[in-house]
Image: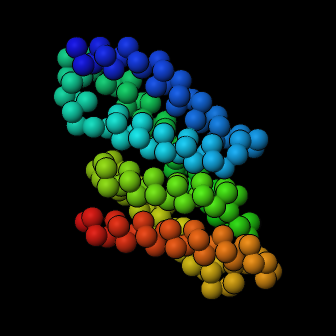
Amino acid sequence: EDVQAIQSCWTSLADLKESATETLGSQAAKGGSKVYCVKYLECFILFLNEAELKVLCMGDPAVYAKFQLAAKGAADTVFGLASFIMNENETTSTLPTPVAIVVLNALGALAKGKPEVFARRSCDVLSTLAAELGSKSKSGGGGGGRGTDTTKVAAVLQSLKQVLLSLAKFE
């Protein structure tokens, strides 16, 4: 019954995932919309990785495989966004600061929510970002003295520290 209920709303869930992914890739979309899209994908991924869902789908492995494929695609989107937080050739985030912060928090939430699936990948991304942001912070943000660049780097670095600290306390 429960699997049938989930399947009955699957089209809507999958459509929302696609819409969120498209919004995140859009240059025209505003930062606030992107924040909500990242949060939706985070919840979508965690929901589809719930142990109870796997138990519910034991009678229909094809349904569970469909859910897992969708969760993987959404996770790839979130992890892909992390590469835009700080590009080597850029002095600042190519994502608006609030979106970058929500992406960092999503990586932490995924690592804590499903450590056997996401912990290593999240920690690898977060440690790479910590090294990049740390070097940019020490060099004054790399923005040629522009205060906005330094402020963005500092805000993202502070959020990264909080996520890493929460992960360290989690283990």
Q: Horizontal placement of 42 versus 87: left or right?
A: left
Q: Quadrant of residue 59?
A: top left
What percent of the width, then of the height, locates residue 33?
Answer: 63, 43
Task: State the image coordinates of residue 37 (x, y, percent, origin top left).
Answer: 55, 41
The residue sitting at 31% across, 25% down in the picture is 64
Q: Please state the horizontal and vertical placement of residue 66, each as a whole percent of the image.
A: 39, 23
- The structure residue drawn at horizontal position 63% and vertical position 72%, both measured from the top left corner, is 153
- Identify the image quadrant of the N terminus: top left
Which image quadrant: the C terminus? bottom left
Name the residue at 24% across, 19% down. Answer: 2
113 relative position to 93: left or right: left
Question: Can residue 62 be spotted in the picture?
Answer: no
Can you name the residue that lies furthest to the front here? 32
138, 44: nearer the viewer: 44
Q: Is residue 161 above or below residue 6?
A: below
How was the colour assigned to the protein in this rendering? Answer: rainbow
Residue 110 sits above or below residue 29 on the image: below
Q: In this rendering, would 133 be left or right of 74?
A: right
Q: Position of residue 137 (x, y in %)?
A: 62, 81
Q: For the point 41% across and 18% down, which residue is it? A: 9
Total numbered circles: 0
Nearer to the camera, 119 or 38? 38
Say whether residue 116 is visible: yes
Vertical comparison of 137 with 28: above or below: below
Q: Quadrant of residue 112?
A: bottom left
